[in-house]
Image (spheres, rainbow, N blue to C red):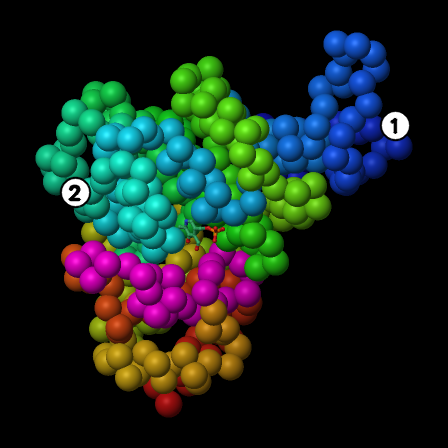
């Protein structure tokens, strides 16, 4: 089934009422027809019909065998990091969501996990960091917030040659534009709070996997059932509703982003524009070979840190807020928000500084967005 059709119809089967919209099953437990008999649903932490519909749609969209919907993107990443044992080594993109860095550095380190951050857009540098104990490579592509593009196919091959798994945080593109499992990745995670939700109204996460029978698939099933990070039925329904317009939203956002990136490039107050849709972006060709769209995340540097702070205060239509992916445009100041706790050494390596702003482009009229940026940057 084509993605647009899948997004609208999912796996929905009509019940006796003929309801077009998937029902919300608010039941914590389920009546058994008899001893050793089950309807397929026994207890809400383990499975809920509304959440199951969502998980089936997400697995199909990512072309995986199984998906789980959990309470946040961080809960999804946390479950995936559970796959590692004390002494194991993980290689992570050095340009990464700050919350992922905090989880690894401040929590997993104390359980004996060892790790290195590397520019995963540089294959040789990544290969050089592999050790016998390396059990996972964890990447974002495009990365957050510097928009580096990593080669999913090559990194999957590198991971597998060394007996490791490749996990891709696919938040920035959504499954509508990029399907890492079809390129060799084993695990995909999302902050579904972002494009999958698309309305800045719920916090949610997704894990999708290539092989449900593999050891990692069985382990994830065990961890999620045992620890209970699952998404509520109401939030599951909200995500199902959001997914119906996923393609329409992200394509409109991408169109807007292209216009805005092009406009930003021509502003004397802007020194650098990082958007994978620009033909002169160093990862443009690679990105095109592994994704069907460029998304709508643009980072840019202004002339001075003072101007960056002024811009945040002058915005009228675009909100100065942390997050991304929604229909409303948001401007984020990564150094003070999403990446505030990032170690200084990583900031220096990636070039994330106090002149960098990150723009999540929404679905508004692009001329209205440009007018707001113009008065904020150039007045
Ligand atoms: C790329 C990326 N991954 C993961 C997360 C964490 O997701 P959540 O905030 O839903 O826990 C975020 C949040 O901003 C993110 O941008």
Can residue 277 be seen at all in this image of the molecule? no
Can residue 31 be seen at all in this image of the molecule? yes
Instruction: Quote the CA–CA distance across marks 1 and 2.
Output: 55 Å
Q: Position of residue 224 (x, y in %)?
A: 53, 31
Mark 2: C-beta under 8 Å from nearest atom of ligand 1: no
Question: Left or right: where does residue 80 sit relative to residue 41?
Answer: left
Q: Position of residue 107 (x, y in %)?
A: 35, 46
Q: Tell me which label, 1 or 2, sits earlier in the chain.
A: 1
Who's the residue at 12% across and 40% down the image?
A: 125
Mark 1: C-beta under 8 Å from nearest atom of ligand 1: no
266 vs 81, nearest the viewer: 81
Which residue in the structure is indicated by mark 1? 16
Q: Is residue 324 rendered magenta in the image?
A: yes
Can you tell which quarter of the image residue 13 is in? Answer: top right
Q: Is residue 316 rendered magenta in the image?
A: no
SS class, disc 1: loop
Who's the residue at 54% across and 69% down the image?
A: 365
- Where the C terminus falls, by quadrant? bottom left
312 vs 258, nearest the viewer: 312
Who's the residue at 66% across and 43% down the image?
A: 232
Q: Position of residue 322 (x, y in %)?
A: 45, 65
- Where the N terminus falls, by quadrant? top right
Mark 1 touches mark 2? (CB < 8 Å): no
Decide: few, some or many residues near mark 1? Use Cα within 10 Å; few <14, some 14-19, many ≥20: few
User: What's drawn in magenta, residue-wise?
Assistant: 322-346
Check residue 87 in the rendering and tell me which mark sits there, or answer none: none
Question: Left or right: where does residue 364 sit relative to residue 171?
Answer: right
Q: Main secondary structure of the magenta part?
A: loop
Question: Left or right: where does residue 222 sit relative to residue 53?
Answer: left
Question: Left or right: where does residue 345 sit relative to residue 198?
Answer: left
User: How many labels sit on residues?
Assistant: 2
Check residue 122 in the rendering and tell me which mark sits there, or answer none: 2
């Amino acid at each position: 089934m084509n993605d647009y059709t899948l997004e609208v119809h999912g796996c929905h089967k009509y019940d006796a009422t003929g309801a077009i919209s998937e029902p919300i099953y608010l039941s914590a437990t389920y009546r058994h027809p008899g001893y050793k008999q089950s309807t397929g649903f026994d207890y809400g932490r383990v499975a809920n019909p509304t959440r199951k519909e969502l998980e089936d749609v997400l697995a199909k969209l990512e072309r995986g065998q199984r998906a789980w919907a959990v309470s946040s993107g961080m809960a999804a990443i946390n479950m995936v990091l559970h796959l590692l044992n004390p002494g194991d080594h993980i290689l992570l993109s050095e340009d990464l969501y700050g919350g992922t860095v905090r989880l690894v550095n401040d929590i997993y380190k104390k359980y004996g996990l060892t790790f290195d951050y590397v520019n995963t857009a540089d294959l040789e540098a990544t290969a050089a960091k592999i050790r016998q104990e390396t059990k996972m490579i964890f990447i974002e592509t495009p990365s957050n917030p510097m928009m580096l593009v990593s080669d999913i196919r090559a990194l999957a091959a590198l991971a597998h040659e060394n007996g490791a798994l490749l996990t891709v945080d696919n938040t920035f593109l959504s499954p509508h534009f990029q399907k890492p499992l079809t390129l060799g990745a084993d695990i995909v995670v999302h902050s579904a709070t972002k494009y999958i939700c698309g309305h800045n109204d719920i916090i949610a996460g997704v894990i999708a996997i290539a092989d449900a029978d593999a050891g990692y698939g069985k382990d994830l099933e065990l961890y999620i059932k045992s620890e209970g990070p699952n998404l509520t039925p109401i939030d599951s329904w909200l995500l199902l509703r959001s997914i119906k317009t996923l393609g329409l939203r992200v394509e409109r956002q991408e169109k807007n982003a292209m216009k805005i990136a092009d406009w930003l490039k021509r502003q004397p107050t802007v020194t650098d524009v990082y958007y994978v849709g620009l033909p002169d972006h160093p990862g443009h060709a690679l990105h095109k070979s592994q994704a069907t769209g460029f998304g709508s995340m643009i980072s840019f540097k202004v002339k001075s840190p003072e101007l960056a702070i002024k811009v945040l205060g002058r915005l009228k239509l675009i909100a100065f807020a942390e997050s991304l992916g929604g229909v409303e445009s948001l401007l984020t100041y990564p150094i003070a928000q999403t990446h505030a706790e990032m170690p200084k050494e990583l900031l220096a390596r990636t070039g994330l500084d106090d002149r960098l702003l990150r723009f999540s482009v929404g679905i508004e009229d692009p001329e209205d967005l440009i007018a707001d940026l113009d008065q904020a940057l150039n007045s």
